[in-house]
Image (spheres, grey):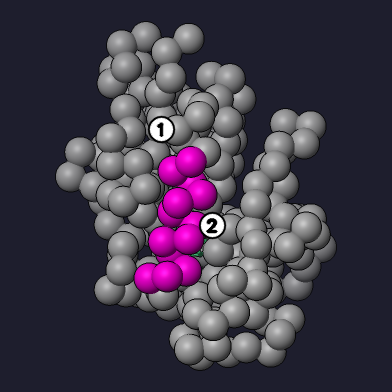
Amino acid sequence: MRKINIAIDGPAGAGKSTIAKSLAKSRNMVYVDTGAMYRAIGLYCSRKGIAGDDETTIVGELDNINVSLAYENGEQVVYLNGENVNGLIRTPEAGAMASAVSVYPVVRSKMVELQQALAEKTSVVMDGRDIGTVVLPNAEVKIYLTASSEVRAKRRYDELVAKGMECDLTQLQKEIEERDYRDMNRETSPLKQAEDAVLLDTSDMNIEEVVAAMQKIIAEKIGD
Ligand code: DC
Protein backbone atom coordinates (compact mmCIF):
# COMPACT_ATOMS: atom_id res chain seq x y z
CA MET A 1 0.00 0.00 0.00
CA ARG A 2 1.26 3.48 -0.90
CA LYS A 3 2.22 5.59 2.13
CA ILE A 4 -0.01 8.64 2.41
CA ASN A 5 -0.54 11.24 5.10
CA ILE A 6 -3.81 13.00 5.83
CA ALA A 7 -3.71 16.29 7.74
CA ILE A 8 -6.82 17.48 9.53
CA ASP A 9 -6.84 20.89 11.17
CA GLY A 10 -9.52 23.03 12.71
CA PRO A 11 -10.76 24.68 15.88
CA ALA A 12 -11.65 22.97 19.16
CA GLY A 13 -14.72 20.77 19.00
CA ALA A 14 -15.02 20.66 15.21
CA GLY A 15 -15.12 16.86 15.40
CA LYS A 16 -11.57 16.30 14.19
CA SER A 17 -10.71 13.40 16.46
CA THR A 18 -13.95 11.45 15.96
CA ILE A 19 -13.66 11.79 12.20
CA ALA A 20 -9.91 11.20 12.04
CA LYS A 21 -10.25 8.05 14.13
CA SER A 22 -12.96 6.71 11.85
CA LEU A 23 -10.95 7.48 8.70
CA ALA A 24 -7.80 5.91 10.11
CA LYS A 25 -9.67 2.75 10.97
CA SER A 26 -11.34 2.40 7.58
CA ARG A 27 -8.09 3.07 5.72
CA ASN A 28 -5.87 1.05 8.04
CA MET A 29 -3.78 4.08 8.91
CA VAL A 30 -2.43 5.28 12.27
CA TYR A 31 -4.39 8.06 13.96
CA VAL A 32 -2.23 10.70 15.62
CA ASP A 33 -4.00 13.10 17.98
CA THR A 34 -1.47 15.90 18.39
CA GLY A 35 -3.67 17.88 20.81
CA ALA A 36 -3.17 15.09 23.34
CA MET A 37 0.56 15.81 23.35
CA TYR A 38 0.03 19.48 24.25
CA ARG A 39 -2.55 18.41 26.81
CA ALA A 40 0.05 16.15 28.46
CA ILE A 41 2.46 19.08 28.74
CA GLY A 42 -0.38 21.17 30.16
CA LEU A 43 -1.08 18.45 32.71
CA TYR A 44 2.57 18.38 33.77
CA CYS A 45 2.46 22.15 34.35
CA SER A 46 -0.86 22.03 36.24
CA ARG A 47 0.48 19.34 38.54
CA LYS A 48 3.60 21.37 39.28
CA GLY A 49 1.51 24.49 39.87
CA ILE A 50 3.14 26.26 36.93
CA ALA A 51 0.93 28.95 35.40
CA GLY A 52 0.18 28.70 31.69
CA ASP A 53 1.64 32.15 31.08
CA ASP A 54 4.92 31.45 32.93
CA GLU A 55 7.01 30.99 29.81
CA THR A 56 10.39 31.00 31.58
CA THR A 57 9.48 28.17 33.95
CA ILE A 58 7.74 26.11 31.26
CA VAL A 59 10.69 26.43 28.90
CA GLY A 60 13.07 25.61 31.78
CA GLU A 61 11.08 22.45 32.60
CA LEU A 62 10.91 21.18 29.04
CA ASP A 63 13.87 18.82 29.38
CA ASN A 64 12.07 17.12 32.28
CA ILE A 65 8.93 16.53 30.21
CA ASN A 66 8.95 13.44 28.08
CA VAL A 67 5.81 12.94 26.00
CA SER A 68 5.48 9.86 23.85
CA LEU A 69 2.72 8.06 22.00
CA ALA A 70 2.06 4.36 21.88
CA TYR A 71 -0.68 2.30 20.24
CA GLU A 72 -2.39 -0.25 22.45
CA ASN A 73 -5.42 -2.25 21.27
CA GLY A 74 -5.79 0.14 18.36
CA GLU A 75 -5.95 3.20 20.65
CA GLN A 76 -3.45 6.01 20.95
CA VAL A 77 -2.01 6.17 24.45
CA VAL A 78 -0.16 9.27 25.60
CA TYR A 79 2.64 8.77 28.06
CA LEU A 80 3.88 11.61 30.22
CA ASN A 81 7.21 10.61 31.72
CA GLY A 82 6.19 6.97 31.45
CA GLU A 83 2.68 7.42 32.91
CA ASN A 84 -0.42 6.71 30.80
CA VAL A 85 -2.33 10.01 31.10
CA ASN A 86 -5.16 9.29 28.63
CA GLY A 87 -7.76 9.43 31.38
CA LEU A 88 -6.57 12.78 32.71
CA ILE A 89 -6.29 15.05 29.70
CA ARG A 90 -9.81 15.22 28.28
CA THR A 91 -11.27 17.92 30.52
CA PRO A 92 -12.01 21.51 29.37
CA GLU A 93 -9.39 22.71 31.90
CA ALA A 94 -6.74 20.47 30.32
CA GLY A 95 -7.74 21.86 26.91
CA ALA A 96 -7.33 25.44 28.10
CA MET A 97 -3.96 24.63 29.67
CA ALA A 98 -2.83 22.89 26.46
CA SER A 99 -3.80 25.96 24.46
CA ALA A 100 -1.80 28.14 26.87
CA VAL A 101 1.42 26.09 26.81
CA SER A 102 1.24 25.49 23.06
CA VAL A 103 1.94 29.13 22.25
CA TYR A 104 5.64 28.75 23.11
CA PRO A 105 7.86 28.01 20.10
CA VAL A 106 10.21 25.62 21.94
CA VAL A 107 7.26 23.58 23.21
CA ARG A 108 5.96 23.41 19.65
CA SER A 109 9.23 22.45 18.01
CA LYS A 110 9.72 19.58 20.45
CA MET A 111 6.24 18.22 19.65
CA VAL A 112 6.49 18.86 15.89
CA GLU A 113 9.69 16.82 15.72
CA LEU A 114 7.94 13.85 17.32
CA GLN A 115 4.92 14.20 15.04
CA GLN A 116 7.04 14.37 11.90
CA ALA A 117 9.01 11.29 12.95
CA LEU A 118 5.74 9.35 13.32
CA ALA A 119 4.45 10.40 9.91
CA GLU A 120 7.79 9.55 8.32
CA LYS A 121 7.49 5.90 9.26
CA THR A 122 3.89 5.14 8.53
CA SER A 123 0.68 6.38 6.89
CA VAL A 124 -1.08 8.65 9.36
CA VAL A 125 -4.26 10.60 9.80
CA MET A 126 -3.01 13.40 12.01
CA ASP A 127 -5.19 16.07 13.56
CA GLY A 128 -4.31 19.35 15.23
CA ARG A 129 -3.96 23.04 14.45
CA ASP A 130 -0.78 23.28 12.35
CA ILE A 131 -0.62 19.90 10.65
CA GLY A 132 -1.29 21.06 7.08
CA THR A 133 0.67 24.29 7.49
CA VAL A 134 3.74 23.26 9.50
CA VAL A 135 3.97 19.63 10.57
CA LEU A 136 3.13 17.89 7.27
CA PRO A 137 3.26 20.56 4.57
CA ASN A 138 3.53 17.80 1.95
CA ALA A 139 0.59 15.74 3.19
CA GLU A 140 -1.27 14.15 0.29
CA VAL A 141 -4.62 15.29 1.70
CA LYS A 142 -5.34 18.36 3.84
CA ILE A 143 -8.72 19.11 5.30
CA TYR A 144 -9.77 22.07 7.40
CA LEU A 145 -12.72 21.05 9.51
CA THR A 146 -14.81 23.70 11.18
CA ALA A 147 -18.27 24.46 12.56
CA SER A 148 -19.90 27.43 14.30
CA SER A 149 -18.89 27.96 17.92
CA GLU A 150 -22.52 27.36 18.99
CA VAL A 151 -22.57 23.95 17.36
CA ARG A 152 -19.11 23.05 18.67
CA ALA A 153 -20.07 24.03 22.23
CA LYS A 154 -23.24 21.97 22.03
CA ARG A 155 -21.28 18.92 20.81
CA ARG A 156 -18.79 19.25 23.66
CA TYR A 157 -21.65 19.73 26.10
CA ASP A 158 -23.37 16.53 24.93
CA GLU A 159 -20.07 14.62 25.13
CA LEU A 160 -19.31 15.76 28.67
CA VAL A 161 -22.86 15.17 29.88
CA ALA A 162 -22.73 11.66 28.40
CA LYS A 163 -19.62 11.07 30.48
CA GLY A 164 -21.54 12.18 33.56
CA MET A 165 -19.74 15.51 33.93
CA GLU A 166 -21.61 18.63 34.88
CA CYS A 167 -21.16 21.67 32.67
CA ASP A 168 -22.66 24.92 31.53
CA LEU A 169 -23.33 25.37 27.81
CA THR A 170 -22.81 29.15 27.76
CA GLN A 171 -19.56 28.78 29.68
CA LEU A 172 -18.37 26.06 27.29
CA GLN A 173 -19.06 28.28 24.28
CA LYS A 174 -17.14 31.12 25.92
CA GLU A 175 -14.18 28.83 26.61
CA ILE A 176 -14.22 27.52 23.04
CA GLU A 177 -14.22 31.07 21.66
CA GLU A 178 -11.33 32.03 23.95
CA ARG A 179 -9.39 28.96 22.83
CA ASP A 180 -10.12 29.74 19.14
CA TYR A 181 -8.88 33.27 19.64
CA ARG A 182 -5.63 32.18 21.28
CA ASP A 183 -4.99 29.32 18.83
CA MET A 184 -5.66 31.58 15.82
CA ASN A 185 -3.75 34.59 17.01
CA ARG A 186 -0.56 33.20 18.51
CA GLU A 187 2.66 34.16 16.80
CA THR A 188 4.03 30.67 16.15
CA SER A 189 2.05 28.33 13.89
CA PRO A 190 -1.39 29.83 14.48
CA LEU A 191 -4.43 27.82 13.50
CA LYS A 192 -5.25 28.60 9.90
CA GLN A 193 -6.40 26.83 6.81
CA ALA A 194 -3.48 25.76 4.62
CA GLU A 195 -3.74 27.19 1.11
CA ASP A 196 -4.12 23.73 -0.36
CA ALA A 197 -6.55 22.42 2.29
CA VAL A 198 -10.18 21.64 1.53
CA LEU A 199 -12.61 23.48 3.82
CA LEU A 200 -15.43 21.47 5.35
CA ASP A 201 -18.00 23.24 7.53
CA THR A 202 -19.79 20.58 9.54
CA SER A 203 -22.28 22.83 11.37
CA ASP A 204 -25.23 21.16 9.66
CA MET A 205 -23.78 17.68 9.21
CA ASN A 206 -23.84 14.55 11.33
CA ILE A 207 -20.82 12.30 11.81
CA GLU A 208 -21.77 9.89 9.02
CA GLU A 209 -22.19 12.78 6.57
CA VAL A 210 -18.83 14.27 7.55
CA VAL A 211 -17.05 10.92 7.19
CA ALA A 212 -18.65 10.39 3.76
CA ALA A 213 -17.64 13.90 2.64
CA MET A 214 -14.09 13.32 3.83
CA GLN A 215 -13.85 9.94 2.09
CA LYS A 216 -14.92 11.67 -1.12
CA ILE A 217 -12.28 14.40 -0.71
CA ILE A 218 -9.61 11.78 0.01
CA ALA A 219 -10.62 9.62 -2.97
CA GLU A 220 -10.47 12.66 -5.24
CA LYS A 221 -7.04 13.64 -3.96
CA ILE A 222 -5.34 10.28 -3.99
CA GLY A 223 -7.35 8.73 -6.77
CA ASP A 224 -8.86 5.66 -5.15
O1 DC B 1 -7.16 19.33 19.69
P1 DC B 1 -7.18 19.62 21.21
O2 DC B 1 -8.42 20.31 21.66
O3 DC B 1 -6.90 18.39 21.99
O4 DC B 1 -5.95 20.63 21.45
C1 DC B 1 -5.67 21.23 22.70
C2 DC B 1 -4.85 22.48 22.48
O5 DC B 1 -3.53 22.13 22.06
C3 DC B 1 -5.36 23.44 21.44
O6 DC B 1 -6.28 24.38 21.98
C4 DC B 1 -4.11 24.11 20.91
C5 DC B 1 -3.05 23.08 21.11
N1 DC B 1 -2.68 22.39 19.88
C6 DC B 1 -1.78 23.01 19.06
O7 DC B 1 -1.38 24.13 19.33
N2 DC B 1 -1.33 22.39 17.94
C7 DC B 1 -1.78 21.18 17.61
N3 DC B 1 -1.30 20.58 16.51
C8 DC B 1 -2.73 20.52 18.42
C9 DC B 1 -3.19 21.17 19.55
Work out whether 94 lies above or below 191: below
* CB-based contact (under 8 Å), mark 2 and mark 1: no
Q: Where is mark 1, residue-wise?
A: 6
| Whole-percent x, y for residue 190 in the image | 31, 65
Closer to the chain start, of discs 2 and 1, is: 1
Distance of label 2 from label 1 (alpha carbons): 16 Å
Work out whether 4 lies above or below 92: above
| Left or right side of 165 for 137 | left
| Whole-percent x, y for residue 34 in the image | 52, 52
Residue at image x 31%, y 62%? 189
Q: Where is mark 2, residue-wise?
A: 35
Amino acid type for the residue under numbered disc 1 = Ile
| Whole-percent x, y for residue 220 in the image | 29, 17
Q: Residue furthest left?
A: 195
Residue sitting nearer the eye, 80 or 220: 80
Residue at image x 41%, y 75%? 104
| Whole-percent x, y for residue 121 in the image | 50, 29
Q: Quadrant of residue 150?
A: bottom left
| Left or right side of 60 for 73 | right
Residue at image x 38%, y 70%? 105
Q: Residues within 10 Å of mark 1 (few under 14, many from 20)?
A: many
| Left or right side of 211 for 188 | left
Q: Quadrant of the C terminus?
A: top left
Label 2 lies in ligand 1 vicinity (Cβ under 8 Å): yes
Residue at image x 33%, y 33%? 139
Q: Which residues are magenta?
A: 105-117
Q: Quadrant of residue 129?
A: bottom left
**Can the viewer see residue 94?**
no
